[in-house]
Image (cartoon, helix red, strand yellow):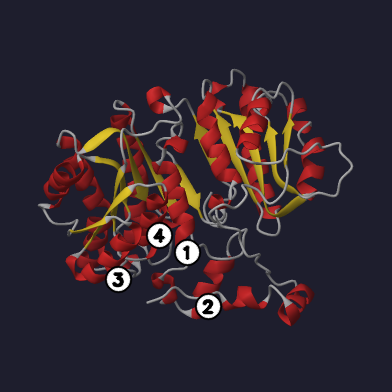
Amino acid sequence: MSAPVDAYARLVRQGPGAALARRLGAPRPTALRRWEAGADLLTGPALVLGIGAAPLAADVSRWLAAAGARLADAEAATDDRFGAVVLDASAVRTTADLAAVREPLAPAFRRLAANGRVLVLGALVADTTTVEAAAVQQALEGLVRTLGKEARAGATVNLLRVGEGAGEALRGPLEFLASARSAFVSGQVLEVGPARGGDAARASAGPRTAVVTGAAQGIGAAVAEVLARSGTHVVCVDLAAQGEQLARVANRVGGSALHLDITAASAPAALAEHLLRRHGGADVVVHNAGITRDRSFVNLDEAGWASVLEVNLRAPLRLTEGLLAREGALRPQARVVQLSSINGIAGAKGQANYAASKAGVIGMVRALDARLAASGGAASAVAPGFVETAMTARMPLLPREVGRRASSLQQGGLPVDVAEAVAFLAGPAAAGISGQVLRVCGQNLLGA
């Protein structure tokens, strides 16, 4: 079943529909700019601003220029709209420093281009040494989340908290959040520390291998496609009943198909054996497979409760333990990326089982990350909001429309939006990010 088309968004983007929406004050979601081969990093010049010492600004300017961005002068007499505005507020330590943020940022924010990007760079609150410094650094989060809700025309606003010694590890997250790959990521906070393994630009000795469960359709298929874009061999995993569809995905991405019931007792050993025998281990594991069995908690029977926990939480736990237990099944510096959900953060009526399983995934990631750190690896999670999939196509019209509009970007995301975030967290560009949850939700109005 194909994903639904957002007919309303198409209607209000041009012509009489746009005029009517303007007159009524109705939402007018902008068509989001997504990754295209050979496209420029930004839609216009990048403006880099700093408050106080701004120790990161020079490196940021250099990295953006190296990525092909044209750097703008805030004082130049021009009508250019900025493709990105980056504010280095990492040295902000007093309320006076915080007050100084408004003067350069407000006029730059006003000149942001459609699908533009605002990135605020802060310090880790844990790295501050005074109560006031901790307070003003935390205040940046409130600023960013508010600007994300005030941004227009597909623009996004995010915060990168940069730890001491992060160095080059900041470059990858900066470029990801500045690019079209982060089209549906807004109002989010990521912490960047030193690169695990000591090299933010690490490359595997030979082609990387990734495992993606639930790869036959939807988000799983999109993840396989985006991972394959970088030359990664993708082992596409799904049930035998999905064999034909799974084969199509595997062939399309130049990967291989593996029929596996991830809930079977034999699944962990079978997956480890397959990876060792056919690929010499895996660099990336993406736990994407999941199910829903929606009913109110008091009407939820034992089977509906247990089946969702089994597929969404217990299977990833068992598969990961199986790979860790088999020497070589996970290569050094391996990355594990879990699919959580905004409903695991905020809860959802009629989804007690699903929300519990997806919240459990977040706990799994945080604990697993510490175990993987010894070999330079990491675990992270992606929490999608409303995404246009075959599952949302089955929703009644009114709840589907509410889901689409209940975000700062006023539209649903696409499977590729989730896939871009997964591929980012699975790759060397995220060498300084670990144990975190990245929401891909267009800054959904539910949750934090």
Pointer 4 or 3: first along the chain: 4
Residue pointed to by mark 1: 387
**The quarter of the displayed image where residue 123 is located:** top right
Would you call the spot at circle 1 few (<14 residues within 10 Å), some (14-19), or many (20 or more)? many
Residue 33 position (above or below residue 231): below
Residue pointed to by mark 3: 299
How far apart marks 2 and 4 lie (CA) works out to: 27 Å
Pointer 1 or 2: first along the chain: 1
Pointer 3 or 2: first along the chain: 3
Q: Amino acid at mark 4?
A: Ala
| x and y, in percent, of residue 131 in the image | 62, 22
Residue pointed to by mark 4: 222
Does residue 146 appear anywhere in the picture?
A: yes
Q: Is residue 358 left or right of residue 22?
A: left
Q: Is residue 215 left or right of residue 341?
A: left
Does residue 345 appear anywhere in the picture?
A: no
Residue pointed to by mark 2: 398
